[in-house]
Image (spheres, grey):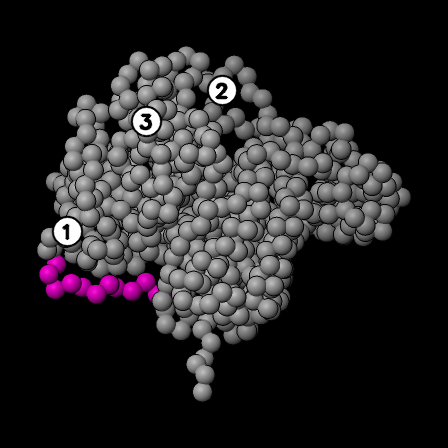
């Protein structure tokens, strides 16, 4: 009898420099990881190369696509398009008389009035001449004040068709309360402009605040054509490779995944796809290791993404943005800073050293890649100081150390300093840039950074961990095994998740419980239908209810959980109590005893969750000779302080380090896709899950 076919689930995270791959054998629990160079010209090529490479490592023959049970993917297609400002011709259809919505925008000065003489609003996503109004009007309850102007709508549709504007966002006033006018507009567009790609605000973001809803809808429309082409291309190549339709999921910003067939209808939900997967993977690894208050720092080639994890869950926000464009969709609260391995070091017009946010990317990349790069990068500084080896991926990609040294020397001459001081300065600025990002997700939100364990991952994420500990006063850093593949691993830990929202602005004391119950039931029905479509059995469906609540007169809300079970008066009152407690935790005060300060409900939310089986993080076999010496793989000159020069420093191969082993710096710990420099005065310990735990020598 032939052996049963193997069942392999794969996670793939496409980054700017490398595509990271993790494969899980669902029967044995075996996990393998690898990397392959990204292919910016056609990301699908790097995607498929990663699948073939990881199946080779599992000793499956070429063409074994039939063994793949599912693929989960983190993509930067939508994010990069927005960050690079590559928005193609886009039209905006709104309620007549509200054509200037994008000019009015929202008063929000990012750096405060004191830092500049004036403030210029971000560039418009749609030029003024591509905005058209259509007659008809709803009030805030959804009741029709003026009927929809069908003749005017047809005229607008023909106007856009005649000018070749094929991507359109539709946002009518108060359509969050009643989608009828928007749906009629779409029907007319199908008749008059059948080639148009259309996004409706009532489907993208069904909540109030007209500017944010309009911008979110337009961003969704802007990325829809490119993301749809990309996802469709991947789906077809997977089908050809496996000889069948392979379940293909795309990571969403909210911490869930969605099937590729559905994500093309909700493209904006993928804008922080990769960083969200990394935060979730790191959260799970840290929780298993015993840490429940964690900062995650995902260092890549272009940027570093940081987030906060409390009680094992990354924090969520609906106040995010991508580049210059605000987005109200639920997303893991990630702050991105241009401080990756490819970040470019340069002199400012004043003659001072600057690092990032410009990046050398994957092509041409840092000088040491020997692919035509001519600008000094963070990676060049690391390799010149000996903190990373003269190669990447265990020797697969050799680095030109001398070329990097030449670039550093030229920059040092312009600065009037030594090459070592120049390289150390580049890394110091990069470390402070990362530290400032970590302060944004902690200190700026009323959290003490010293109360957290930092988890560093990504190809470059762990290179500056000792300096971050010094700058921020962080007591402990955790570096997971295969840190360069944590985002890809996170993709295997993610449930299918859809979010639904309905605005319902009502004072708590005037709240009608039956109306709230009906609204939550309607949202749950939507979520259930989506999970049915994804193929989840009814008995495994899970629904999470939340509410956005504020004090009357506030311009911001606090999201609180709504208890499970029947929704009655006691449940509603419990939400108010939770709001008071959460407000105090966030802002240091509440008005729970002040009847003059009324509580107001704003938005009702339901998340529908289809659970998947997560990979098990297993304890490693504990060696009998815990703490015994481990032979070094070699040594090389490393500079940790410019004034101290180079010192011969032991180099250890991480897979050889057993649980319980402890080593004091200075030492370099290397593995296939990452390097951990342990500076003098720091100690690294291998825990029972093969994480590296770094502390100060005095605290060890």
| Residue 368 visible (yes or no) | yes
Residue found farthest to the bottom:
1
Q: Is residue 580 magenta?
A: no
Local SS, label 3: helix
Q: Nearer the N terminus, badge 2 or badge 1?
A: 2
- Whether residue 240 is situated above or below residue 639 in the rendered picture: below
- Percent position of residue 341, x then y: 39, 36
Disc 3: CA contacts within 10 A as few (<14), some (14-19) or many (>=20) = many
Local SS, label 1: loop
Local SS, label 2: helix
Camera-nearest residue between 151 and 36: 36
Marks 3, 2: nearer the viewer: 3
Camera-nearest residue between 52 and 333: 52
| Residue 274 visible (yes or no) | no
Q: What separation in Å lies between label 1 and label 3 (alpha carbons)?
A: 30 Å
Who's the residue at 67% across and 44% down the image? 221
- Asked whether, in this view, residue 295 is left or right of residue 548, the answer is left
Who's the residue at 48% across and 42% down the image? 16
- Whether residue 376 is situated above or below residue 569 in the rendered picture: above
Label 2, on which residue?
A: 113
Disc 1: CA contacts within 10 A as few (<14), some (14-19) or many (>=20) = few
Label 1, on which residue?
A: 631
Disc 2: CA contacts within 10 A as few (<14), some (14-19) or many (>=20) = few
- Percent position of residue 215, x then y: 63, 38
Which region of the structure is painted magenta?
614-626
Who's the residue at 85% across and 47% down the image? 192
- Asked whether, in this view, residue 33 is left or right of residue 631, the answer is right
Label 3, on which residue?
A: 405
């Amino acid at each position: 009898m032939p052996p049963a076919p193997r069942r392999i689930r794969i996670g793939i995270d496409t980054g700017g420099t490398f595509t990271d791959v993790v494969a899980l054998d669902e029967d044995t629990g075996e996990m393998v990881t690898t990397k392959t160079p990204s292919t910016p010209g056609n990301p699908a090529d790097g995607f498929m190369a990663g699948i073939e490479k990881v199946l080779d490592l599992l000793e499956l023959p070429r063409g074994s696509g039939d063994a793949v049970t599912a693929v989960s993917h983190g993509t930067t297609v939508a994010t990069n398009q927005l960050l690079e400002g590559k928005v193609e011709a886009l039209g905006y259809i709104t309620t007549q008389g509200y054509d200037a919505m994008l000019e009015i925008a929202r008063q929000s000065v990012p750096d405060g009035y004191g830092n500049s003489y004036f403030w210029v609003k971000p560039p418009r996503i749609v030029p003024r001449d591509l905005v058209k109004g259509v007659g008809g009007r709803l009030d805030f309850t959804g009741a029709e004040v003026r009927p929809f102007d069908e003749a005017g709508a047809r005229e607008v549709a023909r106007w856009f068709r005649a000018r070749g504007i094929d991507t359109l966002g539709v946002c009518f006033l108060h359509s969050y309360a009643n989608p009828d006018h928007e749906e009629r507009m779409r029907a007319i567009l199908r008749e008059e402009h059948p080639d148009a790609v259309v996004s409706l605000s009532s489907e993208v973001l069904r909540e109030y605040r007209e500017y944010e809803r309009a911008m979110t809808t337009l961003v969704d429309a802007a990325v829809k054509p490119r993301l749809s082409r990309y996802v469709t291309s991947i789906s077809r190549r997977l089908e050809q490779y496996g000889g069948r339709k392979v379940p293909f999921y795309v990571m969403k910003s909210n911490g869930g995944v969605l099937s590729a067939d559905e994500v093309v209808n909700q493209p904006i939900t993928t804008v922080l796809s990769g960083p969200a997967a990394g935060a979730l993977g790191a959260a799970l690894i840290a929780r298993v290791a015993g840490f429940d208050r964690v900062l995650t720092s995902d260092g890549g080639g272009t940027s570093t993404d940081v987030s906060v994890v409390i009680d094992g869950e990354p924090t969520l926000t609906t106040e995010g943005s991508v580049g210059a464009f605000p987005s109200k969709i639920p997303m893991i609260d990630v702050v991105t800073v241009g401080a990756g391995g490819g970040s470019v070091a340069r002199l400012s017009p004043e003659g001072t050293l600057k690092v990032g946010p410009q990046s050398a990317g994957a092509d041409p990349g840092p000088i040491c890649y020997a692919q035509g790069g001519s600008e000094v990068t963070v990676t060049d500084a690391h390799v010149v100081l000996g903190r990373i080896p003269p190669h990447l991926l265990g020797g697969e990609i050799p680095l030109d150390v001398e070329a990097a040294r030449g670039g550093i020397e030229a920059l040092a001459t312009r600065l009037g300093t030594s090459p070592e001081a120049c390289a150390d300065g580049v890394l110091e600025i990069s470390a402070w840039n990362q530290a400032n990002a970590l302060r944004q997700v902690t200190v700026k939100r009323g959290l003490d950074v010293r109360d957290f364990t930092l988890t560093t991952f990504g190809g470059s994420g762990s290179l500056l961990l000792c300096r971050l500990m010094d700058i921020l006063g962080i007591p402990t850093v955790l570096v997971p095994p295969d840190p360069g593949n944590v985002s890809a691993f996170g993709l295997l830990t993610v449930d299918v998740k859809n979010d639904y929202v309905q605005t319902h602005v009502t004072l708590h004391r005037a709240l009608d419980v039956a109306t709230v119950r009906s609204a939550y039931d309607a949202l749950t029905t939507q979520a259930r239908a989506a999970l049915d479509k994804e193929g989840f059995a009814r008995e495994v469906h899970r629904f999470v209810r939340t509410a956005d609540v504020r004090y009357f007169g506030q311009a911001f809300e606090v999201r609180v959980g709504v208890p499970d079970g029947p929704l009655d008066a006691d449940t509603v009152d419990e939400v108010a109590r939770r709001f008071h407690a959460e407000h105090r935790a966030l802002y240091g005060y509440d008005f729970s005893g002040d009847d003059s300060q009324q509580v107001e409900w704003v938005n009702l939310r339901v998340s529908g969750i289809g659970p998947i089986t997560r990979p098990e993080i297993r304890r490693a076999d504990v060696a009998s000779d815990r703490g015994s010496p481990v032979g070094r793989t070699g040594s090389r000159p490393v500079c940790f302080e410019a004034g101290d020069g180079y010192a011969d420093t032991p180099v250890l191969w991480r897979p050889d380090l057993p649980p319980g082993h402890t080593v004091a710096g200075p030492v370099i710990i290397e593995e296939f896709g990452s390097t951990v420099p342990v500076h003098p005065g720091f100690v690294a310990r291998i825990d029972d899950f093969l994480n590296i735990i770094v502390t100060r020598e005095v605290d060890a």
